[in-house]
Amino acid sequence: MRTFLRNFFQFCAGGALLILGLLFTVLAIDGRPPPVILNNSVTTVVVGDSHIQCAVDDSALPGVVNLSMDSEGYIFSYAKLRYLLQQNPGIEKVILGCGPHNFSSYYEEGIWGEKSGPVLRRYTELLTPGERAEIILRNPCTLKDLSRGISSARFASFTPDGRVRFIGAFEAMNTGKPTDEASILKRIRSQFYIGEKVVSFSVIQRRYLDKIVQLCREQGKTLILLGTPLHEIYRSHVPPAYQAHYDAVVRTTDAEMVDFHDMVLPGSSFLPDGDHVNSRGAQQVTEYLARYLRGLSLAERAESGCDN
Amino acid sequence: MLFNSIDFAIFLPLVFVLYWFVFNKGLRIQNALLLAASYVFYGWWDWRFLGLILASSLLDYVVGLGLGRENRNVRRKLLLGASICLNIGLLGFFKYYNFFAESLTNAFTFFGLHLDPNRLNIILPVGISFYTFQELSYAIDIYRRKIAPTRDLIAFLGFISFFPQLVAGPIERAANLLPQFLRARQFDYGKAVDGLRQCLWGLFKKMVIADNCAVYANDIFNHAGTSSGSTLLLGSVFFAFQIYGDFSGYSDIAMGSARLFGFNLMRNFNFPYFSRDIAEFWRRWHISLSSWFRDYVYIPLGGNAGTIWMRIRNVFIIFLVSGLWHGANWTFVAWGLINALYFLPLMLLNRNRKNTGTVAAGQRLPSGKELLQMGMTFFMTLLAWIFFRADNLSQAFQYIARIFSPSLLQMPNVCPVEVLLLLCGFVAVEWVQREKKHALHFDGRALPRPIRWAVYYGLLCGIFIYGGSRQEFIYFQF
C-alpha cells in the first residue's frame, strides 16, 4: 500500500508538471493561422456574432463579405480583424454587429465560460499569448480548449467546404416557427438576468470594442456599428440600464452607427427568439444597408471632390 | 454521478481511503462501507429510487433464504415465481408500460378502433435493467442449487448495489461476486495498479473516442435527410465507435474501480469489432448480458436441443428479448431481429462456434481472409446499429436506403480529420493488445517505468485536450 500511494503521488506530481508544460506550450506556440486573402473587389467586411451573420446577405451587396460567426465575442472579432486587415489592405470599411446583448456578462459564457469550448477552438490560432493568458487566468479550464484549438489548427483549419474555421458567412436562418412572447421573454432572461437580478455589464466586451475602434482608426478604416433589428416585444423588455449603456457606448464610440433596432419589421421577419431575423428580415436589412452604404459612398465621393 | 465527473473523482478516492485505512478493521464493516457508498452513489442519481432498490433487494434476499430452506418443489417454484414476477414486473412497469400502451393503441387504431389508455409519467430508475437481472440470477441459481443463499444481509445488499457496476453493468452473477463479499480482501499492488490502468483506458474510450464520435454521429443522424450516402455510412461508423467506446469504456472503469477494492468483476467486452462472424461478435459484446440470456432463457427453452424449428424459435426469442431489454422502442426489437437473422445461418450450418480464439493470434497482422471477415462482420453490425440509433423504424429504413444510393460514391459532407486519426490510433492500439485483458494490460513483460508513465501521461493529455463535450453514457438509459 505504501508503494502504491508513493507511486500514485509521484505520478500526480508528474501530472501537475505536465499541465504546466501544456500551459507553457499554449502560451508560447505560434498560432500560424492559414492565409485569408479576400477577393480584390472586397472593400467592406462584416464581422460579429449570429445576429449580424443572419441579417446581412452579402450576395446582394457588391464589395461586401460577411465573415460573422455565431457566439463571436469582441475579443475574437478583434483578433480576426487584426489578422484580416494585415492580409487584406484593400479593406476600407468594417461593419461590426452591436446590440445591447453584446454588453451583457452572459456573453462571457462564450469567451471563458461553459459554452466557450467550441468557440475558443475556432480562434485560438488568432489569439496572442497575452489574450490566451487572459482567458486562462479568468478560467483555467479553458486551457483544455485552447490546447485543442492549437492541436486542431495543425490538423484541420479547414472545414470540409473549404472555409477557414474562424471565417464565417451569411447564414439564412429559418425555423418555420413564428415569434412568440414566451420565447422572446426566455431569451431576454437568459441574456440579461440571473434570477430576478440584472446581470452586470461585460468589461471585456467593452474593452475589445474599444480595441476594434482603435485598430480601425490606426489603420484608416471606417468602422460602422450595425444594430440589427429587434422585435418590439424584445426591445421593450431590454432592461433600461442596458439600453442606456448601449446608447452611451454608441454615443461615445468613435464610429458610425447604423441602428436598425427600431426598424419596423413584421413579426414574420424574426426568429422565435425575437433578436435574430430570418431570411425575410435579412432581405429587408440588406436592402436598407445597401442604401446606407450607397449614401455613405456618395458622401465620401463628395468629400473627396470626385464629383467635381 | 458520472464516472467522468469531478464528483466521482472525489468520491472514488474518498471511499478508497476509508475502505483501506479507516474501515479495514473487519470484513463486515468494510462491506457496510461499500454498501453505504453504493447507496450514496445511487442516490446521487435520484434518491427517490433508493427505496425501490432496497425493497427489491430485500425481497430477493428473503426469497433466497426461503429457497435455501424449502425442499418441496411446489413451494420452491412459488418462491422463484415471486422473485421473477417482482423483478420482471418492476422492469415491465417502469420501462415498458407506456411502450405497450402506445403500441396497443396504435394496433387498435390500425383496425379502426379507438383506445384511450392512460399514459403515465414514469421516470425510469437508473440501472433497473441491470440490478433486476442480477437479483433474478441469484434467485434462479439458488433454485437450481448452483449456489447456497447467503444469510449475510449486508454482503447481499452490497452485491446487488455494488457501485462500480450498479448503473450500467457488467451484470454480475452471484457465484462470481457474492463470494468476494464474503471473504476478506487484501490490498494487492498489482491488481490496484492494473485497475487504475483499466480505468484510464476506460476514460479514454469514453471521453475521447465515444464523446467525440457522438458529436458527429448525432449531427449526421439529425441531418440524415440531406446527407450523402458516404456521410451516412461515416455517421454509422461514428455511432458504432460511440456506443463501443461508451459502453466498454464504462465497463473498463467499473472493472478497474472494483479492482481497487480487491474485487474482480466479469469481463464484459473482448474487442468485439475484431470478430470474424456475428456469433463471435456476440461472444465478445456485452458478454454479461448475452451469457445471462443464454443461461436463464436460451438453455431453459431447450437451447440447441430439440428440433430445428425449436432452435430457430429459441434464437429469435433470445435476440428479440435482448433487443427489447435495451429499450422500449420497436427499433430495438428490429435490431434484435436483424441480429437473429444474421446469427441463424451460422447456427443452422453449425458454424457458430468456428471462431472461438483470438483473430490472428500471435501474428502481427491479420490475413487477407481474416481482414475480409472482420470487415464484413463490422459492416453487418453497422447496419444493425442504425436501427439501434434511429428514433423510429421509418428513419432507420430511410437512413439505410440513402446509404445505398449513388451518393455513396461522393465525398462525405463531414470529414473530421482529427477524430478519424484518433479512431485509427485507437483501433491500432486495441489490435496490438487484442490478446490481453484490456488495452493497457501489461502482463509480466512490463515496459520500463518511464515508457509506461509516458503512455499514461499521453493518454491523460489526450483526455484533457480531446475529451469531448460531455455526453451521458448511452447504457444509462437502459
Image: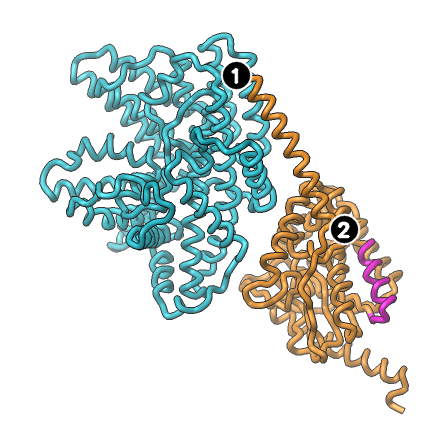
Chain colours: A orange, B cyan
B350 or B246, which lies in front? B350
Q: Is residue B352 visible?
A: yes
A126 or B293, which lies in front? A126
Q: Main secondary structure of the magenta part?
A: helix
Q: Secondary structure at mark 1?
A: helix
Residue A158: where, in percent of width, then height? 60, 63
- Mark 1 residue type: Tyr
Magenta segment includes A216: yes
- Callout 1: 10 Å neighbours few (<14), some, many (20+)? many
Quickly name the residue at label 2: A129
Magenta segment includes B112: no
Give the residues drawn in magenta, as a range: A207-222
Q: Secondary structure at mark 2?
A: helix
Quickly name the residue at label 1: B19
Task: Name the residue: 17% across, 34% down.
Answer: B301
A41 over B113 or under it: above or below: below
**Pointer 1 chain:** B
B190 or B67, which lies in front? B190
- Mark 2 residue type: Pro
Tell whether B73 sits left or right of B166: left
Res B96 quadrant in image: top left
